[in-house]
Structure formats: C-alpha cells, structure tokens
C-alpha cells in the first residue's frame, strides 16, 4: 500500500525518512498517535477474554524502570556513602 498508510514495523530502513515526513507532528496528531498506541496495547494485553496478569505486570514493570531511571542519580550518590 501507500507509504503513509503503513505501520512503522512494515517500513524498510531506507523508506524511514520519507515515512516520517508523512506523519502528523502537530499536538493533535501526536495525541492521536499516543491514543492509538494505548488502545492497541489495551486491546492486546488487557482487554482479552482469557487474560492473565501479563498486561498489568508489563505496565508495572515499565513504571518501576521509569521511576528507577528518574531516581538513578540519587541512588548512585547514596550507594557510595559510608555508614559508621
């Protein structure tokens, strides 16, 4: 199909700049992309008939990694302190 209608995973590396040029980078377009990604994630992992804890655990693991990344500098400085 046309390049503008392809998903990111279907675009070849040489076509990536042209595909990025067709994307909508306005605030409304970015919000629509985030909403589409969230709906896709929700439908695949959370809103399933016989779902398990995989979707929620992936979300919690992502939150843990993100919060660790935010606090890494504090943790790194705290690690080298000596306690007497």
Image (cartoon, rainbow, N blue to C red):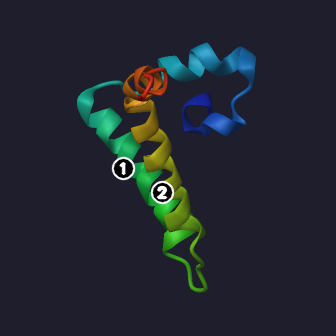
What's the residue at 25%, 35% (across, down)? 28
Drawn side of residue 11 relative to residue 44, left or right: right
**Image coords of residue 33 (percent x, y):** 40, 41
**Image coords of residue 36 (percent x, y):** 42, 50
Q: Residue furthest left?
A: 27
What's the residue at 42%, 54% (across, down)? 38
Tally of marks: 2
Image quadrant containing the C terminus: top left
Q: Of 66 and 10, which appears nearest the observer?
A: 66
**Image coords of residue 21 (percent x, y):** 49, 17
Q: Of 1 and 35, which appears nearest the observer?
A: 35
Element under disc 1: helix
What's the residue at 55%, 31% (across, down)? 4
Element under disc 2: helix
Read off the residue under disc 2. 59
| Neighbours of disc 1 within 10 Å: few (<14), some (14-19), many (20+) | few
Q: In whole angstroms, how far apart are the C-alphas of marks 1 and 2? A: 16 Å
Position of 34 relative to 44 (above/below): above
Snapshot quadrant of residue 70: top left
Drawn side of residue 42 relative to residue 1, left or right: left
Q: Residue furthest front?
A: 84
Q: Earlier in the sequence, mark 1 or mark 2?
A: 1
Q: Residue 66 has which mark?
A: none
Position of 41 relative to 65 (above/below): below
């Amino acid at each position: 199909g046309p390049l503008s209608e392809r998903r990111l995973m279907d675009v070849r590396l040489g076509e990536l700049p042209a595909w990025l040029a067709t994307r909508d980078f306005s605030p409304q377009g970015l919000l629509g992309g985030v909403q589409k990604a969230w709906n896709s994630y929700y439908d695949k992992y959370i809103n399933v008939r016989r779902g398990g804890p995989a979707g929620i655990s992936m979300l919690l693991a992502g939150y843990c990694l993100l919060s660790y990344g935010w606090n890494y500098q504090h943790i790194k400085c705290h690690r080298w302190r000596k306690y007497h």
